[in-house]
């Protein structure tokens, strides 16, 4: 017995009080606290990353929903627009935007004179520069639509140049303007004076959502109209194709398929397709739909087909889960009163699984809506100003898509396009939030637990 | 008649078939005074299915095979003399298609008639100018042989569409009529239509196989094509990536693979520890309130499109790293770098690691925790010595899946990593990846016979093989060890 008490560890243990922590325990508890703190820090990092990501996009993009406009009374001079006086639409159509430019110049000069504004060192050409290069096109469009207004003075809200707009959003300052070839401090001063005179204002920018894309030099006119329409067309194609095919495939695999090699191959295939990088689907689209089948580039139909193939695994996995969740008693009851297997599934199981299927479909569509890489390969990145026609013909017209438009804008030189790209992301995220809220609502409202 | 109108006609016939089939069944039953074997709708359904499905399948197959057949007919008509130096037959074929399309539009616009067209000659009339007038822009003037080929393309395509329309309508009407004739009150209509529907269900589930087949076939086919004109040894072992669109490119994959793995490694270095710690904290420590808030918040990260991360890298993380780390320490001056792309991709991967690990940690039985506590272990000791080893296969699977995502990720690296192919160690320099080069080689006007374009398919195949291997390995590990506790 004495040998045992002699061992130092035990002696130490006997001396230790239960009310006082030993050195080792303290160390272990410190480790415990440290570990816990690291865990909490990781969670906080994750949430901060989300906040930072969304915050950065929002703070950069919110301003794209507001735009600076100059209100001008433009006299549509018949001497310039319609020399013959017969308002011939053909002749009017032949006039290019160059004819309209002087009208704007005159109108702006009149306005400056009326308001008694003078800015030192401002040339005649400079004053004109505060109005967007898109403005003559706006005027031309108006005149073509209303030829009867020629000869009258019409009030227009014309876009201010991108740099002037940037000045009111803090992107451009007097200092940067000195170094910038595209804008001068005098122009900014003129803009300030026009603003005090009430002729220049910044307000909500509907055109951002409805206008088509614009060229590199006029970011102020660029909008998402074509991209939103293109995305909508593609989502329509994805929905129409992937929902029936996905549901049919899931019904077969879940309800009918015997356990054999073919079924195994199909299941492995679906699991793998869900994990294939999206860009590989783009290569598939390029090789099969465009090169082989000869479908047009940049068309929503090709994008829709590629995204359908990408969405199918998501929908199949969700649908199978929803079918599995319907208890066997429902099927057995239907079979018991004489329904065939097909009837029991289509009349009873499928309606009960519908909320789950729709939820999965919406989530699949949301994924497809944000997908960019495959669309780059099938030519959706092209510069498209024309709105596609109404479906089904419009499915074959060139169009853009929301995420691709974002990418497209980030590749341009003018920093104003970065603001536009962030704004486009906000639009994209709003669509995604709406879709996901819809999915959550469906799940909450209709999901049944047995 | 366009395919769209044809499809609508078939659908109208289908509805008519349903109504007629149902009526015939009811009428026959009434006449003979017997009961129908199936519900009247089943007879209609059988007729409708026989009308619609074979006809639509035929139409699909025709649309798919038509270009192939026409092309093989026309190909022989193009003499070698019109193929430009260094160009390819496929380019001339593309021109033929566009000219044919333009001629169609000319006829439609009414500016020339069919008769004028057959006498039209490339050396006399300004084809290019006239086609430009209807919106078909051509790169060069039209050679006579090409115009002739375009004319016969039009002729064959026209005949083929007429044949297609006739064949599809004949199938729909013929099979529909046969099915209608076959209706007897004793016919087992329900069984017939259900067998048919079952075949359709099987067909839908084969789409997955077809897709995989399409991916593998298109990648393999073009890759073989590529290795015929570019030596495979050079591709796999050269350390230089320098495509020249005038020929003489060096297309070594090694710098691209290096960039891909470097970026993925940085991403995993961030995502794995943080994702794992999040999973541990949420599963073992946190209260209900924090968990119900933090878990969905972190999973939102997985639902955000990658273009958003790309923009984040481009406008926030890239400039920040350049201005605060790279430039002050003289390590680089580019805002796109391995670190930029890696960090942002790491954020994207956090939810993949955390939610999959969370599931496996929760699947470890409570008894193992209780046993460990009973022996006097602290909570963190239990986690490190008992739970993580028990959950390891699942965690490894999650990490492998995240790695496969990282390798295949495109938009973040396109916008954050840069385009310079480089074998270097400095993470603040721009490097490029396999996916970036696939995008840059295949966007814009591409010519499908040059090695510079075809290399993208070889890159795609490499990517596909890597990600597939990682996925299969991950699934294997998860499946093999999962059953231990179930």
Image (tube, coloured by chain):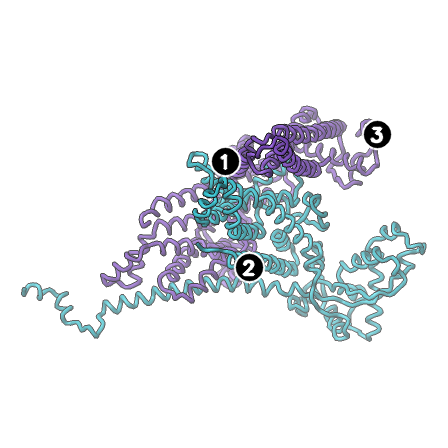
Chain colours: A cyan, B purple
Residue B324 located left or right of residue B478 = right
Residue B440, placed above or below residue B219:
below
Q: Position of residue B363 (x, y in %)?
A: 35, 54
How many residues crowd mark 3 within 10 Å: few (<14), some (14–19), many (20+)? few
Please give the residue where the numbered disc 3 appears in the rendered image. B116
Residue depicted at 70% across the width and 24% down the height: B77
Dot 1 or dot 3: first in sequence order is 3
What chain letter is assigned to the residue under label 3?
B
Numbered disc 2: secondary structure: helix
Residue A365, which numbered label? none
Residue A190 location, quadrant: bottom right
Residue A402, placed above or below residue B83:
below
Residue A437, which numbered label? 2
Any part of residue B226 in sight: no
How many residues crowd mark 2 within 10 Å: few (<14), some (14–19), many (20+)? few
Residue depicted at 41% across the width and 59% down the height: B274
Numbered disc 1: secondary structure: helix
Real-space CA distance between mark 1 and mark 3, rounded to the nearest whole angstrom: 54 Å
What chain letter is assigned to the residue under label 1?
B
Residue depicted at 52% across the width and 64% down the height: A52
What chain letter is assigned to the residue under label 2?
A
Q: Nearer the viewer, mark 1 or mark 3?
A: 3
Residue depicted at 82% across the width and 34% down the height: B126
Identify the image quadrant of the C terminus of chain A. Answer: bottom left
Real-space CA distance between mark 3 and mark 2, rounded to the nearest whole angstrom: 60 Å
Residue B234, which numbered label? 1
Q: Position of residue B450 (x, y in %)?
A: 60, 35
Real-space CA distance between mark 2 and mark 1, rounded to the nearest whole angstrom: 52 Å
How many residues crowd mark 1 within 10 Å: few (<14), some (14–19), many (20+)? some
Identify the image quadrant of the N terminus of chain A. Answer: bottom left
Q: Position of residue A282 (x, y in %)?
A: 57, 43
């Amino acid at each position: 017995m004495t040998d045992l008490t002699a061992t130092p560890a035990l002696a130490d243990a006997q001396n230790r009080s239960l009310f006082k922590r030993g050195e080792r325990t303290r160390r272990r508890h410190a480790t415990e606290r440290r570990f816990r703190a690291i865990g909490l820090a990781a969670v906080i990092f994750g949430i901060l990353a989300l906040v930072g990501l969304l915050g950065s996009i929002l703070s950069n993009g919110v301003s794209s929903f507001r735009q600076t406009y100059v209100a001008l009374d433009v006299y549509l001079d018949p001497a310039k627009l319609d020399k013959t006086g017969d308002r011939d639409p053909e002749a009017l159509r032949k006039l290019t935007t160059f004819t309209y430019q002087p009208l704007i110049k005159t109108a702006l000069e009149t306005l400056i004179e009326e308001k008694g504004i003078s800015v030192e060192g401002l040339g005649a050409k400079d004053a004109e520069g505060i109005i967007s290069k898109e403005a003559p096109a706006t005027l031309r469009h108006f005149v073509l639509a209303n030829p009867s207004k020629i000869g009258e003075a019409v009030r227009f809200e014309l876009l201010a140049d991108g740099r002037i707009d940037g000045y009111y959003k803090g992107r451009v300052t007097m200092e940067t303007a000195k170094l910038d070839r595209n804008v001068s401090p005098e122009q900014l001063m003129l803009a300030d004076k026009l603003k005090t005179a009430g002729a220049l204002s910044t307000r909500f920018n509907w055109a951002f959502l409805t206008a088509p894309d614009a060229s590199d030099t006029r970011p102020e006119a660029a909008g998402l109209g074509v991209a939103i329409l293109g995305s909508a067309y593609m989502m329509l194609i994805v929905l129409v194709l992937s929902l029936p095919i996905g549901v049919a495939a899931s019904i077969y695999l879940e309800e009918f398929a015997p356990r054999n090699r073919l079924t195994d191959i199909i299941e492995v295939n679906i699991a793998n397709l869900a994990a294939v990088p999206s860009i590989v689907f783009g290569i598939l689209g390029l090789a099969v739909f465009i090169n082989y089948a000869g479908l047009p580039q940049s068309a929503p139909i090709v994008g829709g087909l590629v995204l359908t193939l990408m969405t199918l695994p998501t929908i199949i996995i969700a649908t199978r889960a929803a079918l599995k969740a319907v208890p066997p008693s429902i099927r057995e009851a239907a079979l018991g009163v004489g329904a065939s297997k097909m009837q029991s599934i289509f009349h009873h199981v499928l309606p009960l699984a519908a909320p789950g299927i729709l939820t999965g479909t919406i989530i699949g569509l949301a994924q497809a809506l944000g997908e960019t890489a495959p669309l780059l390969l099938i030519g959706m990145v092209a510069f498209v100003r024309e709105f596609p026609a109404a479906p089904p013909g419009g499915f074959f017209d060139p169009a853009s898509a929301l995420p691709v438009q974002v990418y497209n804008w980030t590749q341009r030189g003018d920093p104003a396009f970065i603001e536009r790209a962030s704004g486009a992301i906000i639009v994209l995220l709003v669509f995604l939030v709406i879709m996901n809220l819809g999915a959550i609502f469906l799940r909450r409202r209709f999901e049944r637990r047995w | 008649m366009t395919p769209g109108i044809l499809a609508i006609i078939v659908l109208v016939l289908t509805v008519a078939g349903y109504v007629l089939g149902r009526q015939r069944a009811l009428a026959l039953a009434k006449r003979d005074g017997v009961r129908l074997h199936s519900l009247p709708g089943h007879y209609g359904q059988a007729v409708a299915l026989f009308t619609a499905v074979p006809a639509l399948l035929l139409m699909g197959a025709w649309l798919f095979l038509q270009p192939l057949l026409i092309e093989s007919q026309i190909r022989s008509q193009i003499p070698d003399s019109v193929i430009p130096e260094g160009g390819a037959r496929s380019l001339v074929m593309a021109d033929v298609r566009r000219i044919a399309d333009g001629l169609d539009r000319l006829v439609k616009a009414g500016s020339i008639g069919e008769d004028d067209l057959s006498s039209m000659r490339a050396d006399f009339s300004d084809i290019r100018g006239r086609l430009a007038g209807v919106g078909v822009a051509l790169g060069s003037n039209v050679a006579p042989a090409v115009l002739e080929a375009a004319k016969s393309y039009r002729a064959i395509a026209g005949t083929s569409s007429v044949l297609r329309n006739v064949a599809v309508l004949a199938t729909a009407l013929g099979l529909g009529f046969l099915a209608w004739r076959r209706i007897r009150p004793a016919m087992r209509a329900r069984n017939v239509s259900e067998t048919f529907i079952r075949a359709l269900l099987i067909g839908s589930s084969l789409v997955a196989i077809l897709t995989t087949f399409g991916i593998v076939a298109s990648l393999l086919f073009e890759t073989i094509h590529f290795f015929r004109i570019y030596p495979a040894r050079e591709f796999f072992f050269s350390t230089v990536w320098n495509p020249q669109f005038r020929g003489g490119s060096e297309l070594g994959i090694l710098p691209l693979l290096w960039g891909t793995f470097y970026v993925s490694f940085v991403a995993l270095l961030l995502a794995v520890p943080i994702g794992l710690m999040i999973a541990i904290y949420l599963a073992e420590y946190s209260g209900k309130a924090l968990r119900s808030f933090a878990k969905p918040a972190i999973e939102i990260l997985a639902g955000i499109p990658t273009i958003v991360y790309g923009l984040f890298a481009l406008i926030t993380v890239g400039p920040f790293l350049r201005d605060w780390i790279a430039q002050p320490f003289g390590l680089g001056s580019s805002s796109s770098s391995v670190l930029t792309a890696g960090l942002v991709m790491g954020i994207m991967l956090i939810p993949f690691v955390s939610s999959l690990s969370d599931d496996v940690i929760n699947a470890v039985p409570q008894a193992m925790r209780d046993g460990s506590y009973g022996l006097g272990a602290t909570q963190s000791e239990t986690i490190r010595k008992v739970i993580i080893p028990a959950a390891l296969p699942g965690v490894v699977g999650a990490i492998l899946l995240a790695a496969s995502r990282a390798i295949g990720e495109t938009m973040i690296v396109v916008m954050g990593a840069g385009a310079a192919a480089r074998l270097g160690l400095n993470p603040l320099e721009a490097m490029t990846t396999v996916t970036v080069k696939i995008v840059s080689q295949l966007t814009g006007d591409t010519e499908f016979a040059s090695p510079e374009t075809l290399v993208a398919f070889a890159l795609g195949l490499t990517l596909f093989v890597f990600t597939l291997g990682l996925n299969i390995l991950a699934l294997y590990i998860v499946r093999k060890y999962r059953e231990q506790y179930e």
